[in-house]
Image (cartoon, rainbow, N blue to C red):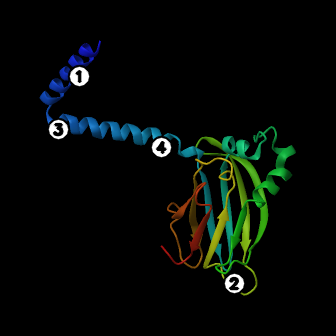
């Protein structure tokens, strides 16, 4: 059996040696593209936090994939359960979003609304919040402590971006990515001036 396996390996090596190098390069590129396509197909399971700066306050839109949210929330989240769960979902989200000033003073987080929506073909809970800094503080630089879903699912990725800023215009189709939150990094520095 071992002799047969060794003979097969030797035959494969001889065959590969006869293949032109450019063919092997093309094969490697094709495999990388296939991997990227498969990895991209799972991007719908990420959370997006889109920040909108307006004077000295920041709107935040959280796009939470309901399949992952159901796991961390420990209840099914979908359109048929939404009316019953809306208060509990509101409290859950507010318990996991904590912006603070550079010296650690907490922002006020106002809950505006939430709804089940389709985002890129998948169901998401879309939540709108407003961040208000403490008296005398600015929203130009703060830390966003955030672990919705990520506190429970270690592989979950949260992308933090600035979507709009009335003082520093951003193209509507091109949000500025600030960073990523995941289980090992549950906060993101938000610097309005870094672009």
Write the residue at 69% across / 55% down.
148
Q: Earlier in the sequence, mark 3 or mark 4?
A: 3
Pick whichever of labels 2 and 1 is earlier in the sequence.
1
- Of 95 and 140, the residue lying toward us: 95
List the residue tagged with mark 4.
Answer: 40
CA separation in Å, label 3 and label 4: 27 Å
Mark sitting earlier along the chain (1/3): 1
Q: Depth check: 7 or 23 in front? A: 7
Who's the residue at 73% across and 78% down the image?
105
For the residues marked 1 and 4, what is the alpha-carbon distance in whole angstroms?
34 Å
Q: Identify the mark nearer the N-term, 2 or 4.
A: 4
Task: Return the residue at label 2.
Answer: 137
Vertical order, 44 against 181 (above or below):
above
Q: Is residue 18 left or right of residue 153?
A: left
Q: How far apart are the alpha carbons under marks 1 and 3? A: 22 Å
Q: Residue at x 31, y 37 (%)?
A: 30
Decide: few, some or many residues near mark 2? Use Cα within 10 Å; few <14, some 14-19, many ≥20.
some
- Residue 181 percent across, percent down from the top left: 58, 59
* Residue 135 place in picture, x, y as percent: 76, 85
- Quadrant of image for the N terminus: top left
Distance between the alpha carbons at the discs numbered 2 and 1:
68 Å
Q: In this orientation, which residue lies closer to the viewer: 34 or 18? A: 18
**Which residue is labeled 1 in the image?**
9
Ranked by sequence position, the earlier of labels 1 and 4 is 1
Reply above or below: 101 against 155: below
């Amino acid at each position: 059996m071992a002799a047969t396996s060794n003979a097969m390996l030797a035959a494969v090596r001889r065959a590969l040696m006869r293949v032109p190098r450019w063919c092997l390069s093309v094969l490697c590129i094709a495999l990388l593209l296939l991997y990227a396509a498969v990895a991209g197909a799972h991007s719908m399971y990420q959370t997006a936090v889109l920040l909108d700066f307006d004077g000295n306050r920041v709107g935040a839109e959280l796009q939470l994939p309901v399949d992952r949210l159901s796991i961390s929330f420990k209840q099914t989240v979908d359109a048929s359960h939404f009316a019953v769960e809306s208060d509990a979902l509101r409290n859950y989200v507010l318990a996991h979003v904590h912006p603070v000033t550079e010296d650690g003073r907490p922002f006020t987080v106002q809950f505006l609304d939430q709804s089940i929506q389709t985002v890129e073909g998948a169901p998401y809970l879309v939540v709108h919040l407003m961040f208000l800094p403490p008296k005398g503080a600015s929203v130009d630089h703060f830390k966003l402590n955030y672990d919705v879903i990520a506190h429970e699912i270690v592989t979950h990725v949260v992308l933090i971006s600035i979507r709009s800023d009335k003082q520093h215009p951003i193209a509507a189709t091109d949000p500025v990515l600030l960073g990523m939150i995941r289980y090992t990094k549950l906060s993101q520095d938000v610097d309005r001036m870094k672009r």
